[in-house]
Amino acid sequence: MLRKFHSLPGLLTGLLLMVLSVTGAVLALAPTLDRVSAVIPASGEISIAELADRIVAHYPGTEQIVREPSGKVIVYYSRDGQAGADLVNPVTGEGTPYEPSAFFGWIKDLHRAFMLDDAGRALAGVLAVLMVLLCLSGIFLIARRTGGWKNILRPLSGSGGKRIHAELARFAVLGLLLSALTGSYMSAQRFGLLPEAPDTGPGFPAEVSGGQPSPVGTLKALGNFDLGELRELVFPYPGDPQDVYSLSTAGGSGFVDQATGELLQFQPRSDSGVLQDWIVRLHTGEGLWWLGLILGAAALTVPALSITGATIWWQRRRSSGQLPDNADAAQADTIILVGSEGNATWGFARELHSSLNKAGFRVHCSEMNALAKQYPQASRLFVLTSTYGDGDAPASARQFMARLKEFRAEKNLRYTVLGFGDRQFPNFCQFALSVDAALAGKGVSRLHAIELIDRCSASQFSEWGNRVGEVIGTPLFLNYCALQPATVKLELVERADYGIAVQAPTSIFRFKPAEQGGWLTASPRRFKALPPFEAGDLLGVIPPHGQAPRFYSLASSASDGIVEICVRKQPGGLCSGYLHDLKPGACIDGFIRPNPGFRPATGSQPVILIGAGAGIGPLTGFIRNNTRCNPMYLYWGGRDARSDFLYQPELGRYLEDHRLSALNTAFSRADERTYVQDKLKQDELAVRQMVNTGAQILVCGGRDMAAAVRQVIEDILKPLHIDIETLRGQGRYLEDVY
């Protein structure tokens, strides 16, 4: 378990972590380079007054003097109406033109935010947290390998990639942990998860002498501070006797009267401010050039750790296989290929694999994406696949058709396809049918005609096994038992009914766990009986008589204190009819299934929500959670505003408090018959502009509506020379279609 906890974050984020580490290593050189170019007088040799006097002698138009953590002194001045900045020798007051390195600036932007502004900064913060987890789990794994904490510094045994990985990790882990912890801290502060240092500086002095300004070198207050304490000295505005010098030092900040030299309103730096400064120093190495070199060396190990770690994972995966007794593909006489979106099909594949193994066959099982160019020893090919969406390939089979073009079947190879789906959808098992036709088109002979399993029926699977067993001459006893998810009793506490007048009864159902006596409304408290969930996740409802669960998109988050779904009653629908017959106080059995692939992106980019009918449920949940009032636009279609304007009161409130930026509705049975795609056409220019500036589109509702919306969006995108597939690849076009 600890190994998985260590390897999975690294595998998922390896490339991004390498970018973060390499840029961090480059930036770690900056403190050393700055230190080399700086002139650092001995402590007590030069006061701030003496420094200012020498600089003013060479730069009469001095406006500001800054001493960086590295010790470099920079003067900002005005000469002949032109602003300038020079790097100054504090001993002589002479300077040379100064300009920050464009290269290091670019590297810093890449390191901090991957050139993506707030979204990139959030990503960098998440990566820093993951690095903390990797470091901590890595330390425990090293301790385990060496036989305990007392042996952690002893020489390691072994060789090759594992030895290199462990040695590098042991060398670098403290430096990486320090960088990751400080980076996580700063990121958490930026996004308001931790309070920032409240240092606001002293207030401007109420009274100043207003007398004739004295030479800066004679000001007593500036003479009392050593140059090493200086951070910034801002000069008063020329000709204004009421203005003052603004002084910032390592110990605090205040003002200096330009006539008397008196220190005014000095405010020592708070403990939180000191802590904040040290966090920055420990992360960047600024002012601690030797630490910067250590952090840079540690960061440079991350690419090597990522490569050796991925290699170790791959070798372990290959040696163990996805299933026990999984034969090598080149030696197997039977091949099972699996196409699955949510892993349900893998359960059937494992049962088939086990039964064939017991019958004495050498069986290789893998996902359809791993189709080899040939299987030299195989005479049987089983393809078990589900269908995703409107006849599309599931996740583990999206590359299958492309790889099939290179596939060379042996003459004795025969195949059979078993499809999994739900007959209530119009394109039932369409991808399985397409695979069957494609294999036949390659000239592969059928072992058995294609069969289709409805709603993961274990009895249909068993009967299929009996028929296939007769064909191959070996009985197959396929007793697949699906793991029933742990359910929670949910009590219906409220429902709102719409659409009866237009023959489209649709209701909003609000549940709470029956075990709890009251509502839970205050975050961060959550339902004890349910895992954390967000709007857009799925509620699995078990219909009467133990039928397979039906899934409905959630319109609420756990912090809302309710489990809310919006359901239209389908003609002959077993589960929708069951829900619509419920009265407040009745209970159902349900469970949560995460659906992270349908969520609005974080950040300030616009979000365009498009839906029809009950598809408004999760979209309303997204709007409800938009407490930062980022741009969010809703396009929604119903039948008649008088009978099925779902969530009308809530949407009105969200428009008032700006969680919803704009609402566009279309009603197909109103005087002006319009559909949601018509509203998108009317707003073509606005939609195109939002997409061009990075907007994300989320679509929820029926398949016909989604198809019509896709066509309109494709037309809108043409002038931008991008298409929906491009947006999908960027995570900017998401669908939850039923």
Image (cartoon, rainbow, N blue to C red):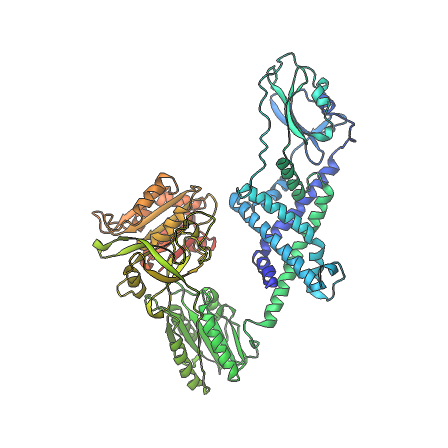
Question: Farthest front residue?
Answer: 517
181, above or below 99, in the image: below
The mark tally for this picture is 0
Q: Nearer the viewer, residue 684 or 448?
A: 448
| Residue in the image at 45% along x and 83% along y | 476
Identified at 59% across, 47% down, the residue is: 184
Judge from the rendering whether residue 712 lies leftward or rightward of residue 504; answer left or right. right
Q: Residue at x 67, y 15 (%)?
A: 260
**Whole-percent x and y of residue 346?**
47, 71
Any part of residue 715 in sight: no
Check the image and report above or below for 684 versus 436.
above
The percent coordinates of residue 13 (x first, y second) are 57, 55
Rendered position, 504 above or below 72 = below
Measured as percent of width and height from the top left, residue 637 is found at 29, 51
The C terminus, quarter of image: bottom left
For the residue pair 504 and 199, the one nearer the viewer reads as 199
Outermost residue to the bottom:
473
Q: Among all residues in the image, which is located at the extreme top?
A: 212
Residue 188 place in picture, x, y as percent: 56, 44
Q: Quadrant of residue 291?
A: top right
Residue 348 is at least partly visible in this image: yes
Q: Nearer the viewer, residue 689 or 561?
A: 561
Q: Quadrant of the N terminus?
A: bottom right
